[in-house]
Image: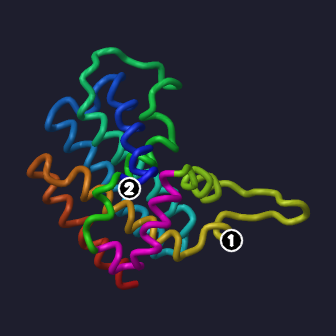
Amino acid sequence: MSKSDENWSRALEETLAEGERIGKTKDQVNAACEHITQLLQDASVLLELGSHATSAFLSISALEETAKVHIGMYRRSTNELKRSKDPLFKHRQKHELALGPTVAMGNRLQAAFGEQRMRELIEIGRAGGLVQIRESALYVKQQSEQLLVPKEIVSIMTSRELLLLAIESFDDALVGYTNETFELAAQTDALFIKWASA
């Protein structure tokens, strides 16, 4: 097991140890998965319209929600944690959890942008780099005399890759828990095919 996988496993154990379950019923899981699918569809529309930085923000949000629902379903504590103490409300932890070892096992991401880039993106996410991309995707930044705007910081290519990564994470983590998730997967698979060949 790599050091990165060990860190992922440790983060998983910490997140499962405490905190109220998320998605307590089949209907709640379906509703959460519909929400994630909508985020992915919205990210696709924005990418198509040229609003690639905002698309990246929504793709990262979809990764976060995927982790929150997937890991949250396995919590068994009835104790609510304060939001500030709950790992499922920390951006970095959700990014790490969304990019578990099984995300890289399929071949769709490798075919879409290569094995090396896939591994880079996963490591960026696990190391906390998506937090910075998330912030850069929404907010202007003054750098000395230059004002940087999101569309100059987050590239179209990165936005496309993040959308594909978020779709794969959703498929890997949540498709199969209910019959409705298979129907949602048909929608997200269509998005994946569209952007994998773009």
In what element is the residue under mark 1? Answer: helix
- As shown in the figure, which amino acid type bears the numbered disc 1? Glu
Task: Characterize the local packing of mark 1: few (<14), some (14-19) or many (20 or more) Cα atoms within 10 angstroms.
Answer: some
Instruction: Reply yes or no: does residue 111 show up in magenta.
Output: yes
Quadrant hosting residue 198:
bottom left
- As shown in the figure, which amino acid type bears the numbered disc 2? Leu
As drawn, which residue projects farthest toward the top?
A: 79
Q: Residue drawn at (34%, 25%), measured in percent from left and top? A: 17
As drawn, which residue projects farthest toward the right?
A: 145
Rendering coords of residue 58 (x, y %): 46, 56
Foreground of the two, 84 or 96: 96
In what element is the residue under mark 2? Answer: helix
Decide: is 9 above or below 193.
Answer: above
Decide: is 12 above or below 47.
Answer: above
Q: Which residue is mark 2?
A: 39
Whole-Å distance between the Cαs marked 1 and 2? 23 Å
Q: Magenta span covers which residues?
A: 108-126
Rendering coords of residue 112 (x, y %): 36, 79
Question: Please, what is the dominant secondary structure of the magenta stretch?
Answer: helix
Instruction: Reply yes or no: does residue 109 show up in magenta.
Output: yes
Is 62 on the left-hand or right-hand side of 133? left
Nearest to N terminus: mark 1 or mark 2 = 2
Q: Mark number for residue 152?
A: 1
As drawn, which residue projects farthest toward the left?
A: 179
Q: Residue drawn at (57%, 65%), measured in percent from left and top? A: 53
Q: Nearer the viewer, mark 1 or mark 2?
A: 1
Foreground of the two, 173 or 179: 173
Q: Residue drawn at (28%, 57%), measured in percent from left and top? A: 102
Is 158 on the left-hand or right-hand side of 81? right
Q: Residue drawn at (49%, 74%), measured in percent from left and top? A: 49
